Amino acid sequence: MKKIVGLLLVIFTAAFLPAVSANEKQAIAIIDTAIDTAQVNVFHEVCLMEEKQCPNKQSYMEGPGSAHMPASRGFEHGTQMVQIAQQVNPNMNIVFIRIYPQDRRGNIAKNAANVNSTVRQALEWVVNNKAKFNIVAVSASVGETKFSRRGHYCPVNSGIRNAIVSLQNLGVASIFAAGNRYDYARVDYPSCIAEAISVSSVGVRGNVERYSNRSAETDFFALGTIGSSTGTSAATVALASYWAKNYKGNFSDTYNYFKSIAKSASTEGFTTNLFVDVLN
């Protein structure tokens, strides 16, 4: 079970953020590869990476076209995440943050998006823009497996943890994929951070998927096969979209509501009561 924490400074600052119109749609931020704007539309686009590969030839860009890449060579993942989000909750806005550059062959450079730098910066962007876009959840289907060898396996970095805690205090859930490595004792980093929400995967028959990582750090299980996508990435963006659909005005009330509606799911030798039916 994850900790619900509070930082007085963050709460004090949030009190002076611009008010959001009651008629404005809630939004989620999806941190991922890129989107093909010929296939999907989002409310706002951001490009943020270490390399100067945004469309403006810099490492940062905002506005139409900022996150665009054709849905191929590994970049299609982001487009798939947006399609799942819009299926689960069509009545919300999506802010898409592209964090992956290309390699020399034009393929996605998977190892270029470092969790403790690029993902942290993306989370900090959400902290600074939460009120502007009415963001209530972040979906990040990213993960690393460089675990600690001493003490608890989760290699917590203070920078990314502080960003997650700041978002939680602003009412925003930071939702990460548990990973797809058949690991039943550890989930990927930063999903394993206590204040993050870790999502594992359930199949279409209500069964816990064998490929899905799970551990004591898992907060919820969600459907991991939606459309042509299968995995904890799909489950993560689906849960984030469902979070926005059922948002109760703050983090703790929404988290507790999800706990109250969670159902049972099982696989051989394992049963959980943390399955949230995102298509209900």
Image (cartoon, rainbow, N blue to C red):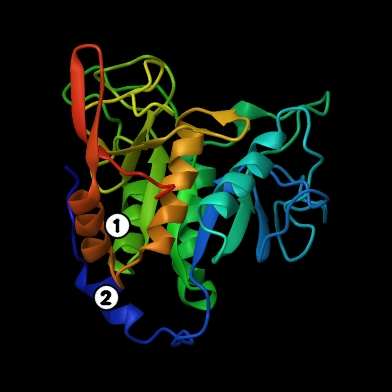
Image quarter where the N terminus lies is top left
At mark 1, the secondary structure is: helix
Mark 2 is on which residue type? Ile
Image spot of residue 50 (x, y percent): 64, 43
Residue 268 lies, in percent from the top left, at 24, 12
Disc 1 to disc 2, C-alpha distance: 11 Å
**Residue 66, horizontal then vertical, whole percent:** 75, 57
Q: In the displayed structure, does residue 217 sit left or right of residue 50?
A: left
Decide: few, some or many residues near mark 1? Use Cα within 10 Å; few <14, some 14-19, many ≥20.
many
Figure check: 158 above or below 72: below
At a point 52% along the width and 36% down the height, the residue shown is: 114
Circle 2 sits on which residue? 11
Quarter assignment of residue 94: bottom right
Q: At x 36% / y 62%, what residue is drawn?
A: 167
Residue drawn 38% across the image and 57% down it: 243
Tell me: residue 14, above or below residue 263: below
Residue 173 locus on image (x, y percent): 35, 56
Q: Which residue is mark 1?
A: 165
Amino acid at circle 1: Val
